[in-house]
Amino acid sequence: MNNMTGLIDYGMGNMHSIAKALERAGGEVRWIASPEELQQVQRIVLPGVGAFRDCVQALERTGLGEAIVEQVRAGVPFLGICLGMQVLMDVSYEFGEHRGLGLIPGAVKPFPASHPERGFKIPHMGWNDVVLSSGRGSHPVLAPLAGRQVYYVHSYYCAPENPQHLLAACSYGDFPFAAAIGRDNIVAVQFHPEKSQKAGLAMLESFIRWHP
Amino acid sequence: MLSKRIIPCLDVANGRVVKGVQFVDIVDAGDPVEAAIRYDEQGADELTFLDIRASHENRDTLYHMVTEVAEHVFMPLTVGGGVKALADIENLLHAGADKVSINTAAIFNPEFVRQAAERFGSSTIVVAVDAKRVDNDNPGRWECFTHGGRKPTGIDTVEWAKRMADYGAGEILLTSMDADGTKNGYDIPLTRAVSEAVPANVIASGGVGTLEHLAEGLRDGKADAVLAASIFHFGTHTIAEAKAYLAGQGIPVRL
C-alpha cells in the first residue's frame, strides 16, 4: 500500500529540513504545490515559519487551504508544525485579526508582554518539555516524546476551546501553553520535530506509521 | 522548564572549518559536516557557523556547505558572516539555515534589521554585537566595534542591543572583544547589563576557557545561551561534559 507523505509547499518555511527529516524517519515525501497533487498522497504535513496572515493568504491563493480541509475531513492523517499548527485554529491575533482554517476551535494569542527581569523573553526559543495529556492514554504520534525535550521557536501560542483537543502542554516560565493539539486524524505541534534531533525523528516516524 | 542552550561555534572559510588564534595562524581544521555530526552526537543544542572570509565569490560555497550540514543534522543552524541584504538572508534560509546573524550591516543600516525581521520573522534574525569596554567604572560602559574589534563606532552597546531588539531581532549574539581569545571567561558585567536590558534572547560569547565560565555566563551573566568555540573544538571538553557540569551546578540543561 502506498504511504506517500505530502509536504505542503506554499513558499514559506524550511521545507528542505522537514523533507530531509521525514525521509530520515523512513518516509517517502512528495512536495505539494497544488490541490490536484494533494489527491495523490496518503498523509499531509503542513510546515510553517513566518507570519500567520501571509501563511493563510498563500493557502487561499493556491487553493491548498480548501483542499487540506477537504482531505482532513475525509480522514487523511495530518501533521501541522508550528505555524502549520496555528493556522488550524479559528482566528489569530498576530498583527491584527485573521481567520484560520477552523479545523480546531480556538484562537492564536501572543505570549503576555515579556519581563526581562524574570528571564521571560520573546520569542520562546530553545529546548523545553512536552508534557503528554494523560486522559485517554498518550497520543500514539507523541508517545516517543515522553520525558524528552524538543525545540521551540514562537511568540504566539494556540488556545484550543475544547480541553479534549489539548494533547500535550509546555510551560514558559510559569505560563502554560499547548505543545500539541489534535482530534481524530489531526495532530499538530508547536515545536519543530525536524529540529529536535533524535526525539523529533522518533515522533515523525510514529506519524508515518500512524493509522488513526 | 526551558533549558539553557550550549552552542558550539564553527568558523568557516571556503566551505571548510578553520581555526586561528586571535585571527592569525588560520589553519584548515576539517570538514563542516563531520564537525556538525560530532557535535550532534555530543548533544549540542544548536550550531553556529560564521563565515570569516565572507567574500562574495565564495557565497555559493557557503550555501552548499549549509545545505550539506542541514541534510545530516536535525537541529537549529545559525549562519553569519557578510550578511548585507535581504537576498543574502533568503539564500541562507533557502540553503537550510534556521537563523541568520547580521553584524556590520546592522551598524551601517539599522533599518536593515527591521526589514529583515518583518520579512522573515524575529525568530530568524540574530544581531551579532561586538562590544569593547570603554569605561572601567562600575557597572561600566561598552561601545560597539566593527572590523574584528578594530573600529570604534561611538555606539553604546546596551542602548544598541535594546534598539536591535526593538527593531525585531530575536537574539543578540554578544561578543566581548576584550575577553575574546583570552580563555579568562565571559565579560560578566557586560553580559548581565545586556541580558537585563533587552527582551530578546542573549547569547554570551568570547573568552570561555573552562566549564565554570559557561556556568558564570548563564548564572551571573543571565544569558539564555552560551557560545564557545575552542574548548569544544580542540577537544578540551565535550558538550556532554559541559552539560553534566552545568546540571551539577543547578542550571537547567537538556541532558
Image (cartoon, rainbow, N blue to C red):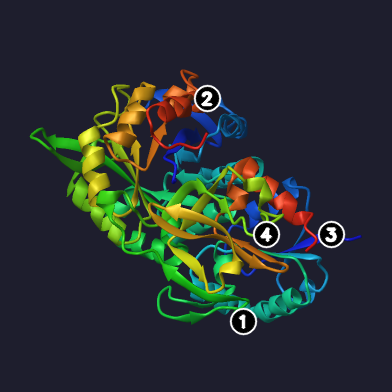
Q: CA separation, marks 2 and 3?
A: 44 Å
Q: Identify the disc placed on residue B28.
A: 2
Chain holding disc 3: A
Q: Residue at x 58, y 34 (%)?
A: B40
Q: Identify the disc placed on residue A3.
A: 3
Q: Are marks 2 and 3 in contact (CB under 8 Å)?
A: no
Chain holding disc 1: A
Mark whose residue sits in front, 4 or 1: 4
Badge 1: how crowded within 10 Å, few (<14), some, or many (20+)? Answer: few
Q: Secondary structure at mark 4?
A: loop
Mark whose residue sits in front, 4 or 2: 4
Q: Are marks 1 and 2 in contact (CB under 8 Å)?
A: no
Q: Position of residue A105 (x, y in %)?
A: 57, 77
The residue indicated by pointer 4 is A136
Badge 3: how crowded within 10 Å, few (<14), some, or many (20+)? Answer: few
Q: Kindly indicate whether the residues beneath marks 4 and 1 are on one polypeptide chain.
A: yes
Give the mark, 4 or 3, whose residue is nearer the N terminus.
Answer: 3
Q: Residue at x 17, y 40 (%)?
A: B142
Q: Amino acid at mark 4?
A: Arg
Q: CA separation, marks 4 and 2?
A: 55 Å
The residue indicated by pointer 1 is A61
Q: Identify the disc placed on residue A163.
A: none
